[in-house]
Image (cartoon, rainbow, N blue to C red):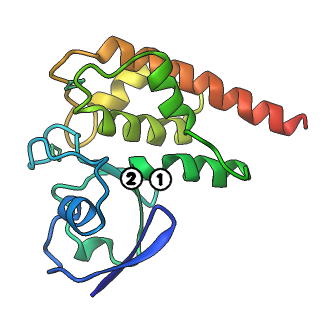
Amino acid sequence: MTALVVNGVKREVQAPTDTPLLYVLRNNLELSGPQFGCGMAQCGACSVLLNGKEVRSCITTLGSVAGKEVTTLEGLSARWAQQKGLSGAALHPVQAAWIEEQTPLCGFCQNGMMIKATELLEKNAAPTVDEIKDAFTGGISPHLCRCGSYTAIIQAVQRASAAMSNATSKRSHA
Ligand code: FES
Ligand code: FES
């Protein structure tokens, strides 16, 4: 039995410790945000936050995340609410920006894009376009979108950045 915290809730999973975290999330915990794209850390569709850092859950073993905190797409709104001391938030600003910019085309890659955007904006509240491009193309491999939604992703990150800064300044003036 391996214990981990997923979206703020302690979970115990009965599975071999070399099981990919992606399979645990989708099959054992029924979280369908992370997608199986390549299975080889080459596309980003399976990304989750592990203690706040984006990782590819397809190559991350269950054993390696024992006792750690995993956030999936499903947990982003609660993560934002907890960070800002809100009683509840319908959507994380990243998710709202994705909708407002109508970013997804087929949508398959967008889990990883939103996870990456969240990681970036938690570290850098106002990234430049170059910093956004670096975030999505650096790391273990670039985040790939076969539909070519890259321009809309940059616009959505900028929109989310503005919304998050606005929320922070509103609270500091409250
Ligand atoms: S499915 Fe994990 S990086 Fe592609
Ligand atoms: S929206 Fe289709 S793969 Fe990115």
Q: Are marks 2 and 1 in contact (CB under 8 Å)?
A: yes
Residues packed near mark 1 inside 10 Å, few (<14), some (14 to 19) or many (20 plus): many
Please tell me which residue is depicted at 23% across the width and 59% down the height of the picture.
26
Q: Is the residue marked 1 within 8 Å of ligand 1, measured from its CB?
A: no
How many labels, in total? 2
Image spot of residue 14 (x, y percent): 23, 83
Please tell me which residue is depicted at 28% across the width and 51% down the height of the picture.
32
**Quarter-of-image position of residue 174:** top right
* Disc 1 secondary structure class: helix
Answer with left or right where residue 33 lies relative to residue 44: right
Image spot of residue 108 (x, y percent): 22, 33
Q: Which residue is tagged 1?
A: 75
In the displayed image of the protein, which residue is found farthest to the top?
A: 151
Residues packed near mark 2 inside 10 Å, few (<14), some (14 to 19) or many (20 plus): many
Answer with left or right where residue 113 lies relative to residue 26: right
Query: Which dot marks residue 72?
Result: 2
Q: CA distance from mark 2 to mark 1?
A: 5 Å
The N terminus sits in image quarter: bottom left
